[in-house]
Amino acid sequence: MVIRIDPKLERLSRDELTKIQGDRLRVLVNRAWKHIPFYRRIWKERGFSPEEIRTVEDIVKIPFVTKRDILESIERFPPFGDYQGDFPSIRIQASTGSTGKPKPIFHTRNDWENIASLWARRLYAQGMRPNDIVQIAFAYTLFIVGFTSTEGAMKLGALVIPTGSGAVTSSERQIQIAHDWGTTVMGCTGSYMLHLAEVAKKMGFDPRRDFKIRISFHTAEPLTPQMRKDIEEIWGCKAYNNYGSVETGAPTYECEEQDGLHISEDAYIFEIVDPETGKPLPEGKEGELVVTTLFKEAAPFIRYRIGDITSFIPGQCACGRTYRRMNAIRGRVDDMIKVKGVAIYPTDLEPSIAKYEVFGREYLITLWKEGHREFIKVSVEYVGPEQERDEYRKRLALDLRATLGLHCEVETLPSDTIKTILKTEQRIKYKRILDLRK
Ligand code: ZN
Protein backbone atom coordinates (compact mmCIF):
# COMPACT_ATOMS: atom_id res chain seq x y z
CA MET A 1 0.00 0.00 0.00
CA VAL A 2 1.03 3.57 -0.60
CA ILE A 3 0.43 6.36 1.92
CA ARG A 4 -0.55 9.49 0.06
CA ILE A 5 -0.07 13.06 1.21
CA ASP A 6 -3.55 14.32 0.53
CA PRO A 7 -5.46 16.57 2.95
CA LYS A 8 -8.69 14.77 1.93
CA LEU A 9 -7.35 11.55 3.45
CA GLU A 10 -7.07 13.32 6.79
CA ARG A 11 -10.75 14.25 6.65
CA LEU A 12 -12.44 10.94 5.82
CA SER A 13 -15.62 10.04 7.64
CA ARG A 14 -15.41 7.54 10.49
CA ASP A 15 -17.18 4.94 8.34
CA GLU A 16 -14.71 5.35 5.51
CA LEU A 17 -11.79 5.13 7.91
CA THR A 18 -13.15 2.06 9.65
CA LYS A 19 -13.55 0.35 6.29
CA ILE A 20 -10.00 1.22 5.20
CA GLN A 21 -8.57 0.06 8.51
CA GLY A 22 -10.47 -3.23 8.38
CA ASP A 23 -9.32 -3.95 4.82
CA ARG A 24 -5.72 -3.08 5.60
CA LEU A 25 -5.70 -5.05 8.82
CA ARG A 26 -6.90 -8.16 6.99
CA VAL A 27 -4.19 -7.79 4.36
CA LEU A 28 -1.54 -7.16 7.00
CA VAL A 29 -2.45 -10.17 9.12
CA ASN A 30 -2.48 -12.50 6.13
CA ARG A 31 0.82 -11.14 4.87
CA ALA A 32 2.42 -11.53 8.30
CA TRP A 33 1.13 -15.09 8.58
CA LYS A 34 2.63 -15.96 5.21
CA HIS A 35 5.90 -14.08 5.35
CA ILE A 36 6.88 -13.54 8.98
CA PRO A 37 7.80 -16.64 11.03
CA PHE A 38 7.58 -14.62 14.26
CA TYR A 39 3.86 -13.94 13.92
CA ARG A 40 3.00 -17.40 12.63
CA ARG A 41 4.86 -18.94 15.56
CA ILE A 42 3.40 -16.66 18.24
CA TRP A 43 -0.15 -16.71 16.88
CA LYS A 44 -0.17 -20.51 16.65
CA GLU A 45 1.13 -20.75 20.22
CA ARG A 46 -1.48 -18.26 21.43
CA GLY A 47 -4.37 -19.76 19.46
CA PHE A 48 -5.08 -17.15 16.80
CA SER A 49 -5.48 -17.52 13.04
CA PRO A 50 -5.92 -14.85 10.33
CA GLU A 51 -9.46 -15.94 9.34
CA GLU A 52 -10.68 -14.44 12.61
CA ILE A 53 -10.16 -10.94 11.21
CA ARG A 54 -13.15 -9.63 9.27
CA THR A 55 -13.54 -6.05 10.40
CA VAL A 56 -11.39 -3.64 12.38
CA GLU A 57 -13.28 -4.54 15.58
CA ASP A 58 -11.80 -8.03 15.37
CA ILE A 59 -8.39 -6.59 16.20
CA VAL A 60 -8.97 -7.47 19.87
CA LYS A 61 -8.75 -11.16 18.91
CA ILE A 62 -5.09 -10.77 17.93
CA PRO A 63 -2.71 -11.63 20.79
CA PHE A 64 -0.51 -8.82 22.08
CA VAL A 65 3.16 -8.74 21.23
CA THR A 66 5.57 -7.32 23.79
CA LYS A 67 9.11 -6.04 23.88
CA ARG A 68 10.05 -9.30 25.56
CA ASP A 69 8.76 -11.29 22.54
CA ILE A 70 10.97 -9.23 20.26
CA LEU A 71 14.06 -9.62 22.44
CA GLU A 72 13.42 -13.36 22.69
CA SER A 73 13.12 -13.56 18.91
CA ILE A 74 16.53 -11.90 18.53
CA GLU A 75 18.04 -14.32 21.04
CA ARG A 76 16.60 -17.38 19.35
CA PHE A 77 17.25 -16.28 15.79
CA PRO A 78 20.35 -14.09 15.85
CA PRO A 79 21.34 -11.60 14.76
CA PHE A 80 18.08 -10.07 13.48
CA GLY A 81 15.30 -12.20 14.97
CA ASP A 82 12.51 -13.82 12.95
CA TYR A 83 10.17 -10.78 12.98
CA GLN A 84 11.65 -9.14 9.86
CA GLY A 85 9.92 -11.27 7.21
CA ASP A 86 11.36 -12.40 3.89
CA PHE A 87 10.94 -9.11 2.05
CA PRO A 88 13.61 -7.34 -0.02
CA SER A 89 14.66 -4.95 2.74
CA ILE A 90 16.95 -2.04 2.03
CA ARG A 91 17.96 -0.67 5.41
CA ILE A 92 18.05 -1.21 9.15
CA GLN A 93 17.21 1.37 11.75
CA ALA A 94 17.30 0.40 15.40
CA SER A 95 15.73 1.48 18.63
CA THR A 96 18.07 2.29 21.46
CA GLY A 97 15.84 0.78 24.11
CA SER A 98 16.55 1.28 27.78
CA THR A 99 16.05 -2.47 28.10
CA GLY A 100 19.40 -3.49 26.67
CA LYS A 101 20.53 -4.24 23.11
CA PRO A 102 19.27 -2.23 20.14
CA LYS A 103 16.35 -3.83 18.30
CA PRO A 104 17.03 -3.95 14.55
CA ILE A 105 14.05 -2.98 12.39
CA PHE A 106 14.17 -3.76 8.65
CA HIS A 107 12.58 -1.49 6.05
CA THR A 108 11.63 -2.23 2.48
CA ARG A 109 11.74 0.53 -0.14
CA ASN A 110 7.95 0.90 0.28
CA ASP A 111 8.23 1.14 4.06
CA TRP A 112 10.82 3.87 3.72
CA GLU A 113 8.77 5.85 1.20
CA ASN A 114 5.65 5.53 3.32
CA ILE A 115 7.36 6.79 6.46
CA ALA A 116 8.71 9.71 4.44
CA SER A 117 5.15 10.49 3.30
CA LEU A 118 3.87 10.32 6.86
CA TRP A 119 6.59 12.77 7.84
CA ALA A 120 5.60 15.05 4.96
CA ARG A 121 2.00 14.92 6.22
CA ARG A 122 3.18 15.92 9.68
CA LEU A 123 5.31 18.77 8.47
CA TYR A 124 2.62 20.12 6.15
CA ALA A 125 0.13 20.15 9.06
CA GLN A 126 2.72 22.12 11.03
CA GLY A 127 2.94 24.75 8.34
CA MET A 128 6.01 23.71 6.34
CA ARG A 129 5.84 24.63 2.66
CA PRO A 130 8.15 24.14 -0.36
CA ASN A 131 9.84 27.53 0.10
CA ASP A 132 11.03 26.70 3.61
CA ILE A 133 14.66 26.15 4.55
CA VAL A 134 14.73 23.29 7.01
CA GLN A 135 17.64 22.64 9.30
CA ILE A 136 17.62 19.15 10.74
CA ALA A 137 19.60 18.81 13.93
CA PHE A 138 18.45 15.34 14.87
CA ALA A 139 21.18 12.71 15.01
CA TYR A 140 21.78 10.82 11.77
CA THR A 141 22.29 7.45 13.34
CA LEU A 142 20.58 4.09 13.80
CA PHE A 143 17.72 6.00 15.38
CA ILE A 144 15.24 6.77 12.64
CA VAL A 145 14.14 10.38 13.12
CA GLY A 146 17.01 12.26 11.48
CA PHE A 147 16.74 10.40 8.19
CA THR A 148 12.98 10.12 7.89
CA SER A 149 12.27 13.74 8.81
CA THR A 150 14.81 14.73 6.15
CA GLU A 151 13.08 12.55 3.56
CA GLY A 152 9.69 13.96 4.54
CA ALA A 153 10.80 17.59 4.24
CA MET A 154 12.39 16.83 0.85
CA LYS A 155 9.18 15.15 -0.27
CA LEU A 156 7.34 18.38 0.51
CA GLY A 157 9.81 20.21 -1.67
CA ALA A 158 11.51 22.16 1.11
CA LEU A 159 15.26 22.79 1.10
CA VAL A 160 16.96 20.70 3.78
CA ILE A 161 20.17 21.54 5.63
CA PRO A 162 21.14 18.24 7.25
CA THR A 163 23.46 19.48 10.00
CA GLY A 164 22.78 16.47 12.24
CA SER A 165 23.07 16.60 16.00
CA GLY A 166 25.43 18.76 18.04
CA ALA A 167 27.87 15.84 18.14
CA VAL A 168 28.67 16.23 14.42
CA THR A 169 27.94 19.92 13.87
CA SER A 170 28.76 21.99 16.94
CA SER A 171 26.00 24.14 18.37
CA GLU A 172 27.94 27.32 17.49
CA ARG A 173 28.14 26.16 13.90
CA GLN A 174 24.45 25.22 13.89
CA ILE A 175 23.62 28.75 15.00
CA GLN A 176 25.94 30.36 12.46
CA ILE A 177 24.40 28.31 9.65
CA ALA A 178 20.84 29.01 10.80
CA HIS A 179 21.68 32.72 10.83
CA ASP A 180 23.68 32.95 7.59
CA TRP A 181 21.56 30.62 5.44
CA GLY A 182 18.24 31.84 6.76
CA THR A 183 16.80 28.67 8.30
CA THR A 184 13.01 29.00 8.61
CA VAL A 185 12.20 25.61 10.15
CA MET A 186 14.22 23.80 12.78
CA GLY A 187 13.92 20.09 13.58
CA CYS A 188 15.55 18.82 16.77
CA THR A 189 14.65 17.73 20.30
CA GLY A 190 12.94 20.35 22.45
CA SER A 191 15.80 20.47 24.91
CA TYR A 192 18.32 21.02 22.12
CA MET A 193 16.20 23.88 20.77
CA LEU A 194 16.46 25.56 24.18
CA HIS A 195 20.17 24.85 24.33
CA LEU A 196 20.64 26.44 20.90
CA ALA A 197 18.95 29.59 22.21
CA GLU A 198 21.50 29.80 25.02
CA VAL A 199 24.34 29.31 22.54
CA ALA A 200 22.90 31.98 20.23
CA LYS A 201 22.73 34.46 23.11
CA LYS A 202 26.33 33.70 24.10
CA MET A 203 27.35 34.40 20.50
CA GLY A 204 25.70 37.80 20.75
CA PHE A 205 22.51 37.00 18.81
CA ASP A 206 18.95 37.71 19.78
CA PRO A 207 17.07 34.50 18.90
CA ARG A 208 13.85 36.38 18.17
CA ARG A 209 15.31 39.18 16.09
CA ASP A 210 18.35 37.73 14.32
CA PHE A 211 16.83 34.55 12.85
CA LYS A 212 14.04 33.66 10.44
CA ILE A 213 12.96 30.51 12.30
CA ARG A 214 9.17 30.43 12.29
CA ILE A 215 8.50 26.74 13.02
CA SER A 216 10.25 24.14 15.11
CA PHE A 217 9.25 20.51 15.16
CA HIS A 218 10.20 18.12 17.90
CA THR A 219 10.09 14.44 18.72
CA ALA A 220 12.20 11.74 20.38
CA GLU A 221 11.62 13.13 23.88
CA PRO A 222 8.53 14.54 25.59
CA LEU A 223 7.91 18.21 24.84
CA THR A 224 6.40 19.48 28.07
CA PRO A 225 3.97 22.45 27.96
CA GLN A 226 6.59 24.56 29.72
CA MET A 227 9.29 23.66 27.18
CA ARG A 228 6.97 24.54 24.33
CA LYS A 229 6.13 27.88 25.93
CA ASP A 230 9.82 28.67 26.48
CA ILE A 231 10.79 27.72 22.92
CA GLU A 232 7.98 29.78 21.40
CA GLU A 233 8.78 32.80 23.54
CA ILE A 234 12.53 32.72 23.12
CA TRP A 235 12.59 31.97 19.39
CA GLY A 236 9.35 33.69 18.40
CA CYS A 237 8.26 30.56 16.49
CA LYS A 238 5.57 27.90 16.75
CA ALA A 239 6.83 24.66 18.28
CA TYR A 240 5.18 21.32 17.47
CA ASN A 241 5.24 17.99 19.21
CA ASN A 242 5.30 14.64 17.38
CA TYR A 243 5.24 11.18 18.84
CA GLY A 244 6.81 8.18 17.15
CA SER A 245 9.50 5.53 17.41
CA VAL A 246 11.72 3.31 15.29
CA GLU A 247 9.13 0.54 15.54
CA THR A 248 6.27 2.69 14.30
CA GLY A 249 7.80 5.30 11.97
CA ALA A 250 5.88 8.59 12.07
CA PRO A 251 2.41 7.79 13.42
CA THR A 252 1.21 11.01 15.08
CA TYR A 253 1.45 14.75 14.68
CA GLU A 254 0.15 17.97 16.08
CA CYS A 255 -1.72 20.22 13.69
CA GLU A 256 -1.84 24.01 13.67
CA GLU A 257 -4.27 23.90 16.63
CA GLN A 258 -1.59 22.31 18.88
CA ASP A 259 -4.41 20.51 20.64
CA GLY A 260 -3.32 16.88 20.91
CA LEU A 261 -1.60 14.50 18.52
CA HIS A 262 -3.54 13.31 15.47
CA ILE A 263 -3.01 9.65 14.65
CA SER A 264 -2.55 8.85 10.93
CA GLU A 265 -5.34 6.32 11.01
CA ASP A 266 -5.04 5.21 7.39
CA ALA A 267 -1.62 3.83 8.33
CA TYR A 268 -1.98 2.84 11.99
CA ILE A 269 -4.43 1.51 14.53
CA PHE A 270 -3.83 2.77 18.05
CA GLU A 271 -5.54 1.23 21.05
CA ILE A 272 -5.27 2.13 24.72
CA VAL A 273 -5.53 -0.69 27.23
CA ASP A 274 -5.35 -1.19 30.96
CA PRO A 275 -1.65 -2.02 31.59
CA GLU A 276 -2.61 -4.63 34.17
CA THR A 277 -5.52 -6.46 32.49
CA GLY A 278 -4.89 -5.68 28.80
CA LYS A 279 -8.57 -4.72 28.40
CA PRO A 280 -9.42 -1.78 26.10
CA LEU A 281 -10.20 1.40 28.03
CA PRO A 282 -13.00 3.88 27.32
CA GLU A 283 -12.10 7.09 25.49
CA GLY A 284 -10.41 9.63 27.74
CA LYS A 285 -9.09 7.02 30.17
CA GLU A 286 -5.35 6.81 30.53
CA GLY A 287 -3.58 3.54 29.80
CA GLU A 288 -0.93 1.72 27.79
CA LEU A 289 -0.66 2.34 24.07
CA VAL A 290 -0.96 -0.65 21.74
CA VAL A 291 0.20 -0.04 18.19
CA THR A 292 -0.51 -1.71 14.86
CA THR A 293 1.42 -0.51 11.80
CA LEU A 294 -0.94 -1.21 8.90
CA PHE A 295 1.39 -0.26 6.06
CA LYS A 296 4.61 -1.98 6.97
CA GLU A 297 5.96 -4.86 4.91
CA ALA A 298 9.17 -5.78 6.73
CA ALA A 299 8.91 -5.82 10.53
CA PRO A 300 5.32 -4.70 11.00
CA PHE A 301 4.20 -4.31 14.59
CA ILE A 302 0.82 -5.88 15.20
CA ARG A 303 -0.87 -5.20 18.53
CA TYR A 304 2.47 -4.22 19.99
CA ARG A 305 2.50 -3.04 23.59
CA ILE A 306 4.87 -0.18 23.21
CA GLY A 307 4.95 0.70 26.91
CA ASP A 308 3.94 4.37 26.64
CA ILE A 309 1.11 5.82 28.71
CA THR A 310 -1.44 8.17 27.17
CA SER A 311 -5.18 8.68 26.55
CA PHE A 312 -7.40 9.46 23.58
CA ILE A 313 -8.91 12.92 23.35
CA PRO A 314 -12.68 12.78 22.80
CA GLY A 315 -14.30 14.90 20.11
CA GLN A 316 -13.13 16.40 16.87
CA CYS A 317 -10.28 18.83 16.36
CA ALA A 318 -11.03 22.40 15.31
CA CYS A 319 -8.73 21.94 12.27
CA GLY A 320 -11.30 19.68 10.57
CA ARG A 321 -9.12 16.58 10.42
CA THR A 322 -11.08 13.52 11.42
CA TYR A 323 -8.13 11.46 12.64
CA ARG A 324 -8.57 10.85 16.32
CA ARG A 325 -6.21 12.50 18.74
CA MET A 326 -4.23 11.41 21.75
CA ASN A 327 -2.56 13.33 24.52
CA ALA A 328 1.20 13.70 24.74
CA ILE A 329 2.86 10.69 26.33
CA ARG A 330 2.65 10.98 30.09
CA GLY A 331 5.34 8.42 30.82
CA ARG A 332 6.43 4.87 30.29
CA VAL A 333 4.79 1.92 31.95
CA ASP A 334 8.29 1.15 33.27
CA ASP A 335 8.68 4.66 34.71
CA MET A 336 5.49 4.54 36.70
CA ILE A 337 6.17 4.59 40.41
CA LYS A 338 3.71 3.68 43.07
CA VAL A 339 4.07 5.66 46.26
CA LYS A 340 1.63 5.11 49.07
CA GLY A 341 -0.65 3.43 46.54
CA VAL A 342 -0.69 6.43 44.17
CA ALA A 343 0.64 5.92 40.62
CA ILE A 344 2.80 8.81 39.45
CA TYR A 345 5.17 9.52 36.58
CA PRO A 346 8.23 11.72 36.97
CA THR A 347 6.86 14.11 34.33
CA ASP A 348 3.83 14.82 36.57
CA LEU A 349 6.09 16.99 38.70
CA GLU A 350 7.35 19.20 35.91
CA PRO A 351 4.49 21.73 35.64
CA SER A 352 4.69 22.52 39.36
CA ILE A 353 8.45 23.00 39.29
CA ALA A 354 8.35 25.04 36.09
CA LYS A 355 5.85 27.48 37.61
CA TYR A 356 8.62 29.14 39.60
CA GLU A 357 11.57 30.82 37.95
CA VAL A 358 13.64 30.31 41.08
CA PHE A 359 13.89 26.58 40.35
CA GLY A 360 16.09 25.01 37.68
CA ARG A 361 14.82 22.40 35.20
CA GLU A 362 16.53 19.44 36.80
CA TYR A 363 14.89 17.43 39.53
CA LEU A 364 15.32 14.14 41.33
CA ILE A 365 12.80 11.95 43.11
CA THR A 366 13.99 9.88 46.07
CA LEU A 367 11.84 7.17 47.59
CA TRP A 368 12.54 5.36 50.83
CA LYS A 369 10.90 3.43 53.60
CA GLU A 370 10.96 3.63 57.38
CA GLY A 371 9.31 0.51 58.72
CA HIS A 372 6.19 0.21 56.57
CA ARG A 373 5.87 3.91 55.89
CA GLU A 374 6.90 5.22 52.48
CA PHE A 375 8.47 8.61 51.90
CA ILE A 376 9.02 10.71 48.82
CA LYS A 377 11.45 13.58 48.45
CA VAL A 378 11.71 15.90 45.48
CA SER A 379 15.05 17.65 45.04
CA VAL A 380 15.23 20.77 42.89
CA GLU A 381 17.90 23.37 42.19
CA TYR A 382 17.26 26.78 43.73
CA VAL A 383 18.64 29.93 42.13
CA GLY A 384 16.53 32.60 43.86
CA PRO A 385 17.40 34.94 46.74
CA GLU A 386 18.58 33.12 49.86
CA GLN A 387 16.06 34.75 52.24
CA GLU A 388 13.14 33.42 50.16
CA ARG A 389 14.44 29.88 49.81
CA ASP A 390 12.28 28.40 52.56
CA GLU A 391 9.16 30.19 51.36
CA TYR A 392 9.54 28.74 47.83
CA ARG A 393 10.34 25.30 49.19
CA LYS A 394 7.04 25.33 51.10
CA ARG A 395 5.10 26.64 48.11
CA LEU A 396 6.41 23.86 45.87
CA ALA A 397 5.50 21.25 48.48
CA LEU A 398 1.93 22.60 48.52
CA ASP A 399 1.73 22.58 44.72
CA LEU A 400 2.98 19.00 44.53
CA ARG A 401 0.49 17.96 47.15
CA ALA A 402 -2.32 19.49 45.10
CA THR A 403 -1.28 17.92 41.78
CA LEU A 404 -0.07 14.50 42.93
CA GLY A 405 -2.26 14.03 45.96
CA LEU A 406 0.86 13.16 47.92
CA HIS A 407 2.82 14.80 50.65
CA CYS A 408 6.35 15.28 49.29
CA GLU A 409 9.36 16.53 51.14
CA VAL A 410 11.07 19.23 49.06
CA GLU A 411 14.81 19.78 49.10
CA THR A 412 16.47 22.77 47.45
CA LEU A 413 20.03 22.32 46.19
CA PRO A 414 22.53 24.71 44.58
CA SER A 415 22.39 24.85 40.77
CA ASP A 416 24.16 22.19 38.71
CA THR A 417 24.20 19.66 41.55
CA ILE A 418 21.38 17.45 40.28
CA LYS A 419 22.94 16.84 36.88
CA THR A 420 25.98 15.50 38.72
CA ILE A 421 23.88 13.25 40.95
CA LEU A 422 21.97 11.89 37.93
CA LYS A 423 25.25 11.08 36.21
CA THR A 424 27.09 9.51 39.13
CA GLU A 425 24.44 7.80 41.24
CA GLN A 426 24.47 4.18 40.01
CA ARG A 427 21.21 3.27 41.72
CA ILE A 428 19.08 5.57 39.57
CA LYS A 429 17.34 2.93 37.55
CA TYR A 430 15.11 5.16 35.49
CA LYS A 431 15.59 8.77 34.77
CA ARG A 432 15.24 10.93 37.87
CA ILE A 433 14.14 8.26 40.32
CA LEU A 434 16.27 7.03 43.18
CA ASP A 435 14.29 4.19 44.73
CA LEU A 436 15.75 3.06 48.06
CA ARG A 437 12.69 1.13 49.19
CA LYS A 438 13.95 -2.36 48.34
ZN1 ZN B 1 -6.19 19.17 14.31
Image (spheres, grey):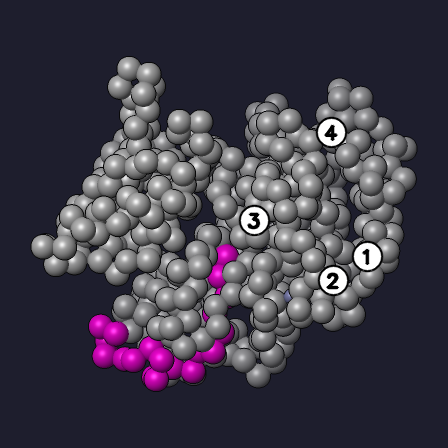
Q: Residue tagged by mark 1?
A: 14
Dot placed on the residue nearer the N-terminal end, 2 or 1: 1
Q: CA distance from mark 4 to mark 3?
A: 21 Å
1 vs 3, front mark: 1
Pointer 1 local density, CA inside 10 Å: few below 14, some 14–19, many at least 20:
few
2 vs 3, front mark: 2
Q: CA distance from mark 2 to mark 3?
A: 23 Å
Position of 399 with respect to 203 (left or right) is: right
Position of 53 with respect to 404 (left or right) is: right
- Say which element carries label 2: loop
Q: Is any part of residue 168 visible from this angle?
A: no
Is residue 231 positioned above or below 101 on the image? below
Q: Amino acid at mark 2?
A: Thr
Q: Residue tagged by mark 2?
A: 322
Figure quadrant of residue 256: bottom right
**Image spot of residue 29 (x, y percent):** 81, 39
Pointer 2 local density, CA inside 10 Å: few below 14, some 14–19, many at least 20:
many
Dot placed on the residue nearer the N-terminal end, 2 or 4: 4
Quadrant for the C terminus in the image: top left
Marks 2/1 in contact by CB < 8 Å: the verdict is yes
Front-lying residue, 53 or 369: 369
Dot placed on the residue nearer the N-terminal end, 1 or 3: 1
Is residue 178 positioned above or below 293 on the image? below
Q: Residue at x 70, y 61 (%)?
A: 316
Ligand 1, what quadrant?
bottom right
Q: Amino acid at mark 1?
A: Arg
What is the number of the mark on residue 245? 3
Q: Residue tagged by mark 4?
A: 63
